[in-house]
Amino acid sequence: MSKRVAIIGAGVSGLTSIKCCLEEDLEPTCFEQSNDIGGLWRFTENIEEHRASIYNSVITNTSKEMMCFSDFPMPEDFPVFLHNSKFLEYLRLYVDHFNLLKYIKFNTSVLHIEKAKDYSTTGQWTVVTEKDGKQECCTFDAVMICTGHQIEAYMPLESFPGLEKFKGNVFHSRYYKNPEGLEGKTVVIIGMGNSAADIAVETCRKAKKVYISTRGGTWVMSRVYDSGFPWDTVFHTRFNNVLRNSLTWLLLRWLTEKKMNQWFNHENYGLVPRNRSLMKEPVFNDDLPSRILYGAVKVKPLVKEFTESSAIFDDGTVEENVDVIIFATGYTVAFPFLDKSLIEVEDNCVPLYKHVFPPHLEKPTLAFIGLIQPLGPVMPTAELQARWATRVFKGLSSLPPESTMVTDIIKRNEKRIKWFGTSRSQSIQTDFITYVDELAVELGSKPNLLMLLLKDPKLALTIFFGACSPFQFRLRGPAKWAGARNAILTQKERIVKATKTRVVDKPSDHNLFSLLKILGLLVLLTAVFFALAQPFSSPSNATVMD
Ligand SMILES: Cc1cc2nc3c(=O)[nH]c(=O)nc-3n(C[C@H](O)[C@H](O)[C@H](O)COP(=O)(O)OP(=O)(O)OC[C@H]3O[C@@H](n4cnc5c(N)ncnc54)[C@H](O)[C@@H]3O)c2cc1C
Ligand SMILES: *[C@@H]1O[C@H](CO)[C@@H](O)[C@H](O)[C@H]1NC(C)=O
Ligand SMILES: *[C@@H]1O[C@H](CO)[C@@H](O)[C@H](O)[C@H]1NC(C)=O
Ligand SMILES: *[C@@H]1O[C@H](CO)[C@@H](O)[C@H](O)[C@H]1NC(C)=O
């Protein structure tokens, strides 16, 4: 009989976990407390208690070829970056295609998860659920927690003296849906993440004044990168990753700053990150710099104190007549249905082996999926976690001893702090390619570039120099996908197709261009020739010949 797996949540992580269970012949049951799939990506006007809540205008900050699941590319006509409703549409296509709906129990909350009576021999868990006020208790061979981490609003009210006296409106970005109601108002936004920037850009068209108040500052990046390609398809190539991992820290930092300041000088815009030794996750916003140029958004330091109607900033400046304060201060990771002895969240950090397994359990039958913030797309990352976890459940892959896992967790945390800093918002941050490769090694699905270079050089070069898209992890190993090779070789075409929606004439100066190319080649050859000829004409050689 196949093992039964409980999956908690039907967002991105839960859906791919169902699919991965099916790949490994496990029997999944997914519990979703709301009445539909999508988790965070299903926008609703009303705010549900245990589900993430987004604003109407959320657009993905990762591109479609990077954020799809590894065996299911997005339809060709989808845009490169997607409105949240479009991404939800993709999730529905995924669910339909792999027939996942029948494994999901909607309107069913998980209240409690605990070790079953004979856990120490079977590794089983008891899951208590509630539907329509009725509780039920079931036993499962393994559990996958896919409940997300952007649910519980974090509002550090205590660090803002005087806030209790403030007469205006105060709320968390979770409660922001659109700029309605902010017409003519003076708005102070606390925080400098993606949400803060999005809300500032959107509200400044209607509000009287908009301030962003930030302690640390941030790098702001455009989604539109070199030659107009989506940032992540250029940033996340294996070639660039090798470079980043082999450069010295100082050089890497220098190059990063140079690149970040290419678009606009972050110092002149008051945005430059305070702690420059860090590769803090950037904010993706194409409009913020222009709004700052128009004077529609002003960047301020932290608020020192609030009064009934004003904000006093750290630099002593005062803004009178503030109407609204929005806390875009992020979220707290929480698992209300788990006992503290199973997992202890400290400083918003969750100590998990490779971000998936609690290290101290006797049996590796409890996995956390999607509890991660890679400097890239969450979807393929969660998918690889789930592929690995299901192999571990089946005993096809095993975990090292507890002490090894604990050491690994400590080391990983030190590296995170070195790269991304100690900021709360980066508590589950990791880099992308290095981490997904690590998971892929566990599965045996990391592409073997040397072998490919001999067998299929075109593919090998695209994998190394092209975008590190999820399809790379379906070329070999368990649950290979026959379409992976073709998907990799055509990914660039698909990106261009989405924007090249008008037939463009071939440039008329085509001949001139070829001529230039030939000329360039000639110059290069001449340069090489002279470089090679150099030693023979150098003075030292001349003396020898004398
Ligand atoms: C504004 C915003 C934009 C983002 N943009 C991107 C992006 O462009 N690219 C990217 O890769 N990532 C992005 N992210 C990160 C995001 O976390 C992931 O994209 C992804 O949504 C995480 O999915 P998840 O399934 O882990 O969690 P969620 O989507 O939060 O789903 C969790 C599900 O679990 C259910 N649940 C919770 N508790 C229980 C319970 N006790 N019982 C039963 N069900 C329960 C919830 O109802 C929900 O459906 C963004 C995040 C935010 C906030
Ligand atoms: C879930 O509850 C809603 C009402 O809250 C109801 O309309 C829907 O039919 C229910 N779905 C299931 C699958 O029970
Ligand atoms: C995209 O935005 C969300 C919400 O702010 C954030 O959690 C995620 O880390 C961002 N992704 C990247 C790659 O910056
Ligand atoms: C910057 O971050 C590093 C690494 O976290 C830390 O050691 C250093 O003290 C920080 N510097 C400042 C000025 O905060």
Image (tube, rainbow, N blue to C red):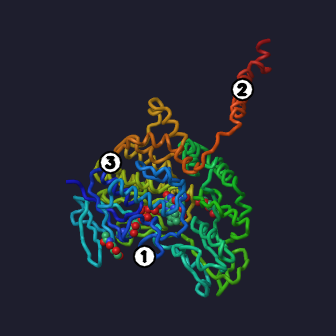
Front-most of 221 and 144?
A: 221
Look at mark 1 in the image and give the residue it sits on: 49
Distance CA(mark 2)–CA(mark 3): 55 Å
| Mark sitting on residue 112 | none
Mark 3 CB in 8 Å range of ligand 1? Answer: no
User: Where residue 298 appears, x then y in whole percent?
Assistant: 70, 70
Q: Earlier in the sequence, mark 3 or mark 1?
A: 1
The image shows residue 532, relative to residue 289, as above or below, that is: above
Query: In the rendered image, is residue 89 in sight?
Result: yes
Of tags 2 and 1, the one toward the viewer is: 2
Q: Earlier in the sequence, mark 2 or mark 1?
A: 1
Kind of residue at disc 3: Ser
The structure residue drawn at horizontal position 54% and vertical position 42%, both measured from the top left corner, is: 466
What crowding class fits label 2: few (fewer than 14 Cα within 10 Å), some (14-19), or many (20 or more)?
A: few
User: Where residue 156 appears, x then y in whole percent?
Assistant: 55, 76
Q: Quadrant of residue 297?
A: bottom right
What is the quadrant of the C terminus in the image? top right
The image shows residue 310, relative to residue 526, as above or below, that is: below
Name the side, left or right, on which 33 lies relative to 493: left
Q: Earlier in the sequence, mark 2 or mark 3?
A: 3
Q: Secondary structure at mark 3?
A: loop
User: Where residue 424 appears, x then y in whole percent?
Assistant: 54, 66
Kind of residue at disc 2: Leu
The structure residue drawn at horizontal position 50% and vertical position 52%, both measured from the top left corner, is: 77
Distance CA(mark 3)–CA(mark 1): 37 Å
Look at mark 2 in the image and give the residue it sits on: 522
Look at mark 3 in the image and give the residue it sits on: 397
Of tags 3 and 1, the one toward the viewer is: 1
**Farthest top residue?**
546
The quarter of the picture showing ligand 1: bottom left
